Image: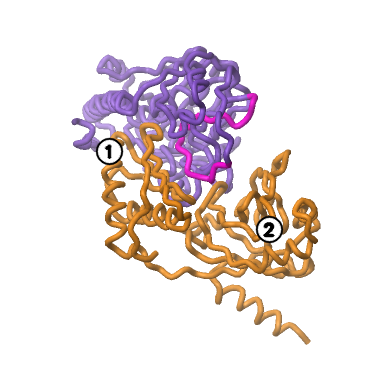
């Protein structure tokens, strides 16, 4: 049986997933959940597959009503969560009865929250992804009165079971501070900045209010390019740190245009991008240099924690008879080496 | 693309999920063939963990999932692909040709006169130079799969606008530096807009979303402002399809 939810207060929310990985070859950015760790965790906690459609809520309060019994999980930025008026916990599966309202308020540390619903959400896809693309005008931006269909409804679950200590089994909740430490590796064009490239690691930067899913603008002491030849347009990676103007540093995020002509000073690591996804205007950012090998190891450790979480959730859901078969995803060989 | 040995290349780390491969021969055409041949090869090899490749003029960005493959493994793949380029014909599809009707100047091309002044030539000469060239799509760029092309034979490079526009309409035909482009979607832009095509270029209900691919041929053809409406709602298609129909309709409608 499918379920339904009704959006009462959309705030700034969209239906998204882990992104359009086939997009860049067609000139479309990857887009998708900016905080990939929190989005994956939400889906895992809701018994979904990692890439299932879910709701990304940015900064503003959000409220929805379940018209059937459903099971949800909320992750990402810390916030005040109530279900049917009862205070509820983030980073846990929560049973919502038909007619109850889910309310999300007070995102003031961190910026983005993720709400996954067991059975996920029906939404149109473009190149295999539901992620919104503001440039081509695709995606499901939620409005007051939007009705979302889920592929499953879940009968009320006796709450005590969810007091099982899921999270002592290894899931780390990301820290959300107003002082962010972001790991980067040297960019392909680091040599073009000469000695001034080191400023990136000795200065502190402030997040500008003009930041969005395309890129974050950071004010502070700027490295300067020593060469000034015209650069041919070329593919730029998500996470590219550029100095396009004399005023701000630009860090490209998942909505970035696929090609550009600015030299790439540094590239934010996969885990660093999750940190930046939660940066609020005014937050302070410091960069720390790492290597690709180290960044990959960190990223794989973090993913391994999510795999542990998946096992725990499958066990609990199995015991409760919640209607999903265990969804094992074998870790690929490369991740174990 | 024909059989050719790959140009010499350099491979740069670009974070934990991408590599940049740059072809560094003296011959830009060879570099372009190399990076596009490599992108096609990577696409076809279907290796686990490879998201895709974004080839442009002399470089290709190879994106991958670092959980599934390591940067070192992808680098080895790239080297294999470069060796293979010289051995196989690659994807040897013949280029298709596209005819692009354009209304130049006026509200359709607000920067036409500015470009003419800067070049020190007449507006008619700008249009003539823009329409007499045959353009090869070099790569798909931002935004939304724009066809990036080598520009017309203007006397000098075209400077970008000092104040980029917040919104350039879909179909805008623009030039900058030594490059030319059509905008498939509404987006901000700093290129000089000299005209606009009434054809729609982007269709997100279709795959691929844009009809051309790198290597295809585009030609621009001047039409009158009053004919703009006749083409609206039609899609840019390889030659011999839509435009032939329009011409038939037009000739049929003539008294």
Compared with B67, A194 (above or below) is above
Q: Nearer the viewer, residue A22 or B58?
A: B58
Residue A292 picture quarter: top left
Q: Which residue is mark 2?
A: B154
Q: Do marks 2 and 1 both belong to one polypeptide chain?
A: yes
Whether residue B161 is visible, yes or no, is yes
Whether residue A97 is visible, yes or no, is no
Going 42% across and 44% down the picture, which residue do you hit?
B61
Q: Quadrant of the C terminus of chain B?
A: bottom right
On the image, the x and y values in percent for residue B175 come to 66, 53
On the image, the x and y values in percent for residue A141 come to 56, 39
Of pointers 2 and 1, the one earlier in the residue sequence: 1
Residue B126 in magenta stretch: no
**Chain of the residue under the numbered disc 2 shown in the image:** B
On the image, the x and y values in percent for residue B117 come to 80, 53
Q: Is residue A172 left or right of residue B168?
A: left
- The chain that appears orange in the image is B
For label 1, the SS is: loop
Residue B69 got which mark? 1
Compared with A245, A236 (above or below) is below
Residue A241 in magenta stretch: yes
Q: Nearer the viewer, residue B133 or A25?
A: B133
Which of the colour schemes (rainbow, by chain, secondary structure, one colour) is used?
by chain
Going 64% across and 45% down the picture, which residue do you hit?
B187
Residue A109 got which mark? none
Q: Quadrant of the N terminus of chain B?
A: bottom left
Q: Nearer the viewer, residue A315 or A218?
A: A218
Q: Residues within 10 Å of mark 2 (few under 14, many from 20)?
A: some
- The chain that appears purple in the image is A
Tell me the chief SS of the magenta region. loop
The magenta region covers A230-247
């Amino acid at each position: 049986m499918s379920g339904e939810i009704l959006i009462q207060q959309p705030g700034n929310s969209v239906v998204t997933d882990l992104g359009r990985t086939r997009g860049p070859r067609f000139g479309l950015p990857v887009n998708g959940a900016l905080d990939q760790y929190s989005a994956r965790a939400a889906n895992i906690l809701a018994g979904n597959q990692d890439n299932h459609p879910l709701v990304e809520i940015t900064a503003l309060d959000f409220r929805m009503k379940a018209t059937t019994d459903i099971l949800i999980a909320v992750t990402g930025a810390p916030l005040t969560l109530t279900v049917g008026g009862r205070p509820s916990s983030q980073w846990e599966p929560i049973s919502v009865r038909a007619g109850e309202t889910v309310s999300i308020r007070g995102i003031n540390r961190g910026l983005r929250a993720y709400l996954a619903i067991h059975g996920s959400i029906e939404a149109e896809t473009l190149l295999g992804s539901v992620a919104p693309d503001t440039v081509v005008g695709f995606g499901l931006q939620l409005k007051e009165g939007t009705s979302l269909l889920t592929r499953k409804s879940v009968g009320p679950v006796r709450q005590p079971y969810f007091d099982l200590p899921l999270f002592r089994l290894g899931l780390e909740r990301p820290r959300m501070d107003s002082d962010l430490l972001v790991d980067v590796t040297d960019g392909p064009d680091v040599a073009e900045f000469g000695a001034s490239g080191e400023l990136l690691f000795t200065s502190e930067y402030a997040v500008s209010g003009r930041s969005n899913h395309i890129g974050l603008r950071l004010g502070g002491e700027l490295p300067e390019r020593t060469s000034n030849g015209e650069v041919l347009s070329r593919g730029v990676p998500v996470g590219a740190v550029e100095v396009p103007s004399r005023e701000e540093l630009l860090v490209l995020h998942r909505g970035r245009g696929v090609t550009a002509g600015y030299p790439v000073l540094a590239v934010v690591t996969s885990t660093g991008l999750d940190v930046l996804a939660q940066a609020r205007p005014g937050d302070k950012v410091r960069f720390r240099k790492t290597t690709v090998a180290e960044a990959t190891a960190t990223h794989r450790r973090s993913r391994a924690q999510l795999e542990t979480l998946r096992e725990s959730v499958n066990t609990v859901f199995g015991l409760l008879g919640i209607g999903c078969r265990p969804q094992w995803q074998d870790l690929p060989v490369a991740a174990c080496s | 693309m024909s059989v050719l040995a790959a140009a010499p290349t350099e491979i740069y780390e670009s974070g934990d999920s991408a590599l940049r491969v740059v072809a560094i021969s003296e011959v830009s055409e060879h570099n372009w063939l190399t990076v596009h041949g490599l992108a096609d090869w990577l696409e076809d090899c279907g290796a686990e963990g490879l998201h895709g490749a974004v080839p442009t003029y002399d470089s290709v960005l190879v994106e991958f999932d670092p959980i599934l493959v390591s940067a070192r493994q992808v680098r080895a793949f790239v080297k294999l692909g470069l060796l293979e380029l010289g051995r196989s014909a690659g994807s040897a599809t013949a280029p298709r040709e596209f005819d692009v009707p354009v209304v130049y100047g006026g509200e359709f091309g607000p920067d036409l006169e500015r470009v003419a002044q800067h070049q020190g030539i007449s507006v008619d000469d700008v249009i003539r130079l823009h329409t007499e060239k045959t353009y090869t799509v070099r790569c798909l760029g931002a935004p939304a799969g724009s066809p990036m092309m080598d520009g017309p034979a203007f006397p000098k490079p075209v400077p970008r606008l000092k104040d980029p526009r917040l919104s350039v309409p879909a179909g805008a035909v623009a030039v900058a530096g030594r490059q030319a482009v059509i905008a498939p979607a509404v987006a901000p832009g700093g290129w000089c807009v000299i005209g606009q095509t009434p054809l729609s270029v982007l269709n997100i209900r279709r795959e691929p979303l844009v009809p051309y691919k790198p290597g295809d041929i585009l030609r621009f053809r001047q039409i009158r402002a009053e004919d703009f409406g006749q083409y609206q709602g039609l899609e840019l298609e390889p030659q011999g399809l839509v435009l032939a129909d329009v011409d038939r309709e037009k000739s049929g409608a003539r008294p």
